[in-house]
């Protein structure tokens, strides 16, 4: 299934339907069934101990899955998260952006399943791994 939106169209649509977070994210790479989404880490994303907060990493995973689902199915803002699992594996570096490398494992008529590996920018080992399932609204 080909992409329904390119990176510029995707970011414009996210700005339209989800303006609360648009300043936090940027698409680094978009391909069929895959997106690399950047969390532009700022002071508000940090927690004590010099690391990025868990809620910020969850937001990156969730927005990565949402972005690739929208890029694949088109302008359907009401696609929603139905389940998530998140494993924290290493301490992300506070001074670096985080990159969510998201891959759709299944894109069905009703459900989409994604896996997201989260890296500190420039790091070669993931700091977290997430799995997300999205419900796709009927047309």
Image (tube, grey):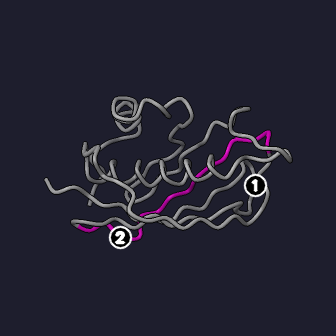
Q: CA distance from mark 2 to mark 1?
A: 27 Å
Q: Is residue 115 above or below residue 139?
A: below
- Specify the quadrant of the image occupied by residue 32: bottom left
Q: Is residue 100 magenta?
A: yes
Which residue, given by chain and number where applicable, does mark 1 sit on?
123
Residue found at the far right of this picture: 49
**Disc 2 versus disc 1: nearer the observer:** 2
Q: Position of residue 43 (x, y in %)?
A: 74, 32
Q: Residue at x 79, y 39 (%)?
A: 95
39 or 17, nearer to the observer: 17
Q: Residue at x 26, y 61 (%)?
A: 1
Left/right placement of residue 3 relative to residue 7 reads left
Left/right placement of residue 111 relative to residue 116 reads left
Q: Residue at x 53, y 46 (%)?
A: 37
- Dot 2 or dot 1: first in sequence order is 2
Mark drawn on residue 106: 2
Q: Residues within 10 Å of mark 1 (few under 14, many from 20)?
A: some
Q: Position of residue 29 (x, y in %)?
A: 50, 46
Q: Residue at x 62, y 49 (%)?
A: 55
**Residue stretch rendered in magenta on the structure:** 94-108
Prevailing secondary structure of the magenta residues: strand
Q: Is residue 44 magenta?
A: no
Q: Is residue 28 above or below residue 2?
A: above
Q: Position of residue 72 (x, y in %)?
A: 31, 53
Q: Position of residue 109 (x, y in %)?
A: 21, 66
């Amino acid at each position: 299934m080909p992409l329904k939106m390119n990176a510029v169209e995707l970011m414009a649509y996210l700005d339209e339907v989800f303006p609360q977070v648009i300043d936090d994210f940027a698409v680094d790479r978009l391909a069929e069934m895959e997106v690399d989404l950047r969390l532009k880490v700022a002071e508000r994303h940090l927690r004590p101990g010099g690391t990025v907060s868990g809620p910020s990493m969850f937001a990156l995973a969730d927005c990565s899955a949402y972005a690739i689902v929208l890029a694949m199915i088109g302008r359907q803002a009401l696609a929603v998260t139905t389940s998530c699992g998140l494993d924290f594996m290493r301490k992300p570096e506070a001074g670096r952006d985080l990159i969510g490398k998201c891959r759709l494992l299944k894109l069905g008529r009703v459900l989409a399943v994604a896996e997201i590996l989260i890296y500190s920018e420039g790091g070669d080992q993931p700091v977290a791994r997430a799995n997300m399932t999205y419900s796709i609204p009927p047309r």
